[in-house]
Amino acid sequence: MSFPSGITAPPPPRHPEKARRPDNPIPRKPDWLRVKAPGSPEYQATRRLMREHALNTVCEEAGCPNIGECWKQKHATVMILGRVCTRACTFCNVATGRPDLLDPHEPRRVAEAVAALGLSHVVVTSVDRDDLGDGGAAHFARTIIAIRSAAPGTTIEVLTPDFLYKESALETVVDAKPDVFNHNLETVPRLYAEVRPGARYFHSLRVLDQVKRLDPTMFTKSGIMVGLGEDKTEVLQVMDDLRAADVDFLTIGQYLQPTIKHHAIARFVTPEEFRSYRSFALGKGFLLVSASPLTRSSYHAGEDFARLRAARAAKLATVG
């Protein structure tokens, strides 16, 4: 179809795979999930910097509720490998479709933005890139190396895809020596077919287990959402599975439905229940646990990394 001069074609739908899904009405949020709309001068400055460096952020693409607070503190989670994902998770608001061309200059731009923000800790994540032979692992490694060069005092946390069927991809990222390796399980195994249809629960567990085998000193981290239809017993089993993989840090947050075409919210988990989950997880041996309605993988990541190092040091001192 052609368009008259001066008129451009409409953009492709953000979630074409969800168009035929039935509508799931979005329930009203309880008081404990309400946040202020972003708009501080620091927020605007961070936004301008991201645009100046032509960077994508998961804060924007996933519609994170904490963006106002985090960007006010000049904390942003950079999303590399483009802004279009090859997966179609029913909980996620990142666009699905034909992915962008890989930008060879992106690692340098990320590093320049990290240096300009003066970050002590940065989180780098990505879309899934099943179309690439290594799933984007080498691009992750190049980004880590570029940040080390431009901002040597910055600690680096990666939140990676599962690199499903990508041989040696995991080794490539681990060899680049991020300070924290995060890979989220997202939900309990029973819900994978509906919530994460392109992923495999036990493969994701193996990713985390293999990171520790490749580098026992590297901090590992994972997170799940609750309110998708799981029950308490299933959440506790996920905790046990993660501890069996020697994962150090667990995050648990409330699932928030992006649109009526996304997975329905089964219920809002109360703050009291989150405190109970945190207590259970600490009892199972995690070094650090963040569990609250607004917890997200990268929320307060810098402060949490400092606590994580302190917790490991205290544990080693006790063992010694």
Image: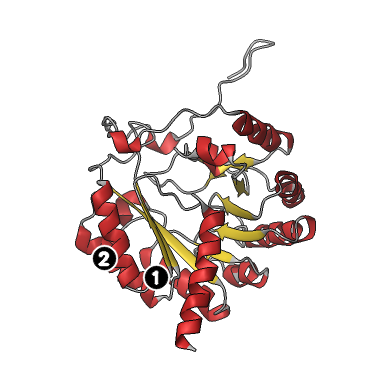
- Residue occupied by mark 2: 236
Left or right, 246 with respect to 225, comes to: right
Q: What's the CA distance linking mark 2 and mark 1?
A: 13 Å
Q: Compared to 173, does 293 lie above or below?
A: above
Q: Amino acid at mark 2?
A: Leu
Instruction: Give how far across and how far down residue 266 sits, in percent.
Output: 23, 43
Q: Nearer the viewer, residue 145 or 288?
A: 288
Quarter assignment of residue 250: bottom left
Q: As rendered, which of 61 and 98 lies closer to the eye?
A: 61
Q: Name the mark on residue 286.
A: 1
Residue type at mark 1: give it: Phe
In the image, is residue 291 above or below residue 233? above
Report the quarter where the N terminus lies. Answer: top right
Colour scheme in the image? secondary structure
Residue 5 location, x and y as percent?
Answer: 69, 10
Name the side, left or right, on which 173 lies relative to 208.
right
Residue at the image point whose x is 69% and y is 58% from the top: 154
Mark 2, secondary structure of its residue: helix
Counting residues from the N terminus, which is met first, the one under dot 2 or under dot 1? 2
| Residue 238 seen in render | no
Residue 144 point in image, percent of width and height: 69, 60
Q: Quadrant of residue 264?
A: top left
> Viewer-nearest of labels 2 and 1?
1
